[in-house]
Image (cartoon, rainbow, N blue to C red):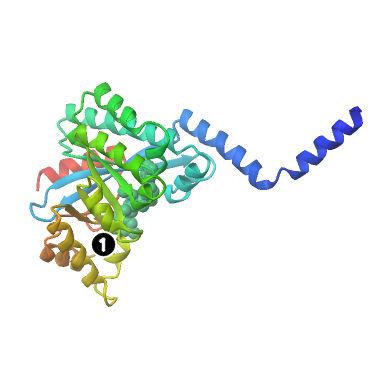
């Protein structure tokens, strides 16, 4: 009867827990955030420890929620992954990053490499090769202007698939960086089994230099190993002069961190670049 139908609907409603309601509202909020331009790219330059010049620029996503203010990617990226929205977000980042790079080229802002973070899911879902290819041709860029940053997590669920995607990406001239190095699992075998060009040492190792026993030794071993494997090695999260000097002595190639420059908006980055050019 009609009454029974209404009752079972009530029961269904009651069983729909807070979690799924939250998911539903987050999904529509993400969608509208994309449409309303609430996402913005920030940029953090990496400095060469030999020449002192900018070697590349990492794109870091920001979300300005009209009610909540700025939400950190450390919060919303895992959520976007869980909700299956990360590929769409990554694709948006790739398009915007390439548009920006082409725009800077016209302004004579010489960004040698633009580094884009890619989520693990993007290697098995979606079509990373195609979205990169499209963006490169749309904005008339060369593959060798782009670096993709991946974490070890990318290779755990589907190694062969990830490896194939990376090989195709490499054929376009794009470089691959292994992000957060030293915090994941079986990283050492990935270094020889995958076409990796750059190692980014996790900031947790750098932060404890020089105070905590063992960290300097670990960093020094990572740098030595990277160089033996002919990889470019970058230290992340460099905040102190002393850390920079230590890395320089080791022969680490580049550094990234608040000591040199924090992530900047597009306008602030252009100012930073102009000021840096005069030095
Ligand atoms: P990540 O790729 O390891 O990025 C480096 C993080 O370290 C950034 O945090 C950056 O702001 C921060 N950082 C830079 N220098 C320093 C320093 O000297 N000290 C400290 N304490 N932190 C520093 P952010 O921007 O909050 O991003 C967090 C993470 O979110 C990123 O970690 C990355 O995994 C993810 N993410 C950011 N943008 C994107 C994106 O466009 N796509 C994807 N898939 N993930 C992104
Ligand atoms: Ca990164
Ligand atoms: Ca990192
Ligand atoms: Ca990370």
Q: Quadrant of the N terminus?
A: top right
Callout 1: CB less than 8 Å from ligand 1:
yes
Q: Which element carries disc 1, helix, strand or loop?
A: loop
- Please tell me which residue is depicted at 21% across the width and 63% down the height of the picture: 222
Residue at (28% x, 52% y) in the render: 190
Query: Which residue corresponds to the image point at 43% horizontal and 33% vertical from the top-left?
Result: 88
Residue 131 coordinates in the image, percent (x, y): 33, 28
Residue 61 shows up from this direction = no
Depth check: give the residue in front, 275 or 193: 193
The percent coordinates of residue 211 (x first, y second) are 27, 76
Residue 162, by quadrant, is top left
Q: Residue at x 10, y 44 (%)?
A: 278
Image location (x, y in percent) of residue 272: 21, 44
Which residue matches tag 1? 239
* Residue 2 sits in quarter: top right
> Is 232 above or below relative to 35?
below
- Percent of width and height locating residue 153: 38, 51
Query: Quick check: 13 left or right of 19?
Result: right
Indicate left or right for 18 with 177 as reference.
right
């Amino acid at each position: 009867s009609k009454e029974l139908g209404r009752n079972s609907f009530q029961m269904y409603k009651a069983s729909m827990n807070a979690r799924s309601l939250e998911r539903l509202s987050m999904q529509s909020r993400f969608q509208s955030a994309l449409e309303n331009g609430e996402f913005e790219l920030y940029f953090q330059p990496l400095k060469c420890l030999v020449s002192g010049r900018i070697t590349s620029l990492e794109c870091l996503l920001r979300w300005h929620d009209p009610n909540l203010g700025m939400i950190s990617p450390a919060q919303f990226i895992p959520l976007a992954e869980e909700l299956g929205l990360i590929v769409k977000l990554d694709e948006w980042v790739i398009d915007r990053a390439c548009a920006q790079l082409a725009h800077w080229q016209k302004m004579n802002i010489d960004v040698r490499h633009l580094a884009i973070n890619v989520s693990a899911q993007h290697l098995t879902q979606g079509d990373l090769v195609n979205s990169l290819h499209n963006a490169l041709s749309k904005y008339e860029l060369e593959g060798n202007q782009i670096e993709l940053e991946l974490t070890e997590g990318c290779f755990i669920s589907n190694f062969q698939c990830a490896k194939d995607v990376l090989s195709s990406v490499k054929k376009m001239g794009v470089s691959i960086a292994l992000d957060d190095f030293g915090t994941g699992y079986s990283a050492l075998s990935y270094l020889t089994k995958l076409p990796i060009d750059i190692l980014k040492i996790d900031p947790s190792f750098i932060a404890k230099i020089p105070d905590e026993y063992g960290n300097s030794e670990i960093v020094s071993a990572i740098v030595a190993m990277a160089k033996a494997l002919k990889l470019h090695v970058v230290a992340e999260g460099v905040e102190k002069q002393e850390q920079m000097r230590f890395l320089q002595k080791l022969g680490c190639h580049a550094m990234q961190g608040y000591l040199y420059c924090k992530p900047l908006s597009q306008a602030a980055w252009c100012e930073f670049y102009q000021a840096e050019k005069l030095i």
